[in-house]
Amino acid sequence: MTDGNDMKQQGIAMAGVELRLGTHDFRFDCALPQGRIVAIAGPSGSGKSTFLNLLAGFEQPDRGRVLLAGQDVTGLHPAERPVSLVFQDNNLFAHLDLFTNVGLGISPSLKLSAQDRQRVSEALARVGLPGFEKRRPGTLSGGERQRAAFARALVRDKPILLLDEPFAALDPGLRSGMVELLKTLHRESGNTVLIVSHDPAEVRRLADHAVFIDGGTIRLAAPIKTFLETGDIPALTTFLQH
């Protein structure tokens, strides 16, 4: 069980969180460091996305507490939580240009001040898309669409960024570039990043800390060196040898 005082000092924590979805039971206890990149790994169907959904508020636990940035958010709506999310499919609106897609991260009603409009353009420039404001998602490559999704997360300016396999659909060259972009943005912002990944090389390259989920629970949460050197969890060994 995670100690309450310890939880308040962490970027992300769960204490005695339990959830049943259909016939599947999930139980999570963890305290993850603030300001780090944390990889979430595990077999398909193990509970990685459920873990993220509990943090984001898309699932409510049957019992237990969720803390984000020192705040108990267990009963809060997703929009009230201090998180931004980027998914594999980037969730851009195809009929809207990039300026509008990114601006939605600031105001769903798109009531943007001159300063807000400047923030949108600056965010696009930071992710390598200067001058792309009027482009629509359908005219972009997969990597460019993910960069636009990152720009939208940037303008939200939340202390925690949740990424659910954001690079899975990209070819190796684009993945490498996006990994470097994420590391750069993290250095600039100092936020806490959780990224679900099925790629052990990506975990090694990105993460300061890692969590391994199997069978609906956390088998290991540790600094990356310890994570990579752990040899007594067969499913983790299989993952690292993949």
Image (spheres, rainbow, N blue to C red):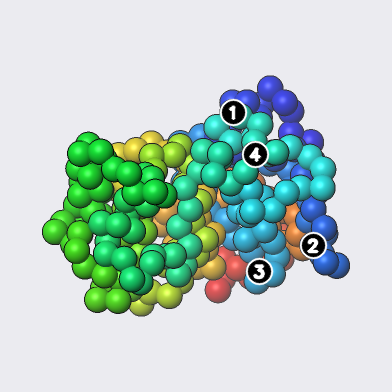
- Residue where numbered disc 4 is placed: 76
Can you tell which of label 4 and label 3 is closer to the viewer?
Answer: 4
Q: On the rendered structure, is 104 left or right of 98?
A: right
Tell me where residue 201 appears, x and y as whole percent: 45, 65
Q: Which residue: 19% across, 63% down?
A: 134
Q: Secondary structure at mark 1?
A: loop
**Quadrant of the rendered image containing residue 187:** top left
Mark earlier in primary sequence (4, 2): 2
Q: Is residue 149 above or below residue 115?
A: below
Dot 4 amino acid type: Leu
**Marks 4 and 2, Cα distance to the nearest angstrom?**
20 Å
Q: Which mark is residue 70?
A: 1
**Marks 1 and 4, Cα distance to the nearest angstrom?**
14 Å
Dot 3 amino acid type: Pro
**Marks 3 and 1, Cα distance to the nearest angstrom?**
30 Å
Dot 2 amino acid type: Leu
- Residue where numbered disc 2 is placed: 21
Give the camera-side residue of 32 and 58.
58
Q: Which residue: 70% across, 38% down?
A: 75
- Residue where numbered disc 3 is placed: 43
Q: Secondary structure at mark 4?
A: loop
Dot 1 amino acid type: Gly
Can you tell which of label 4 and label 2 is closer to the viewer?
Answer: 4
**Marks 4 and 3, Cα distance to the nearest angstrom?**
29 Å
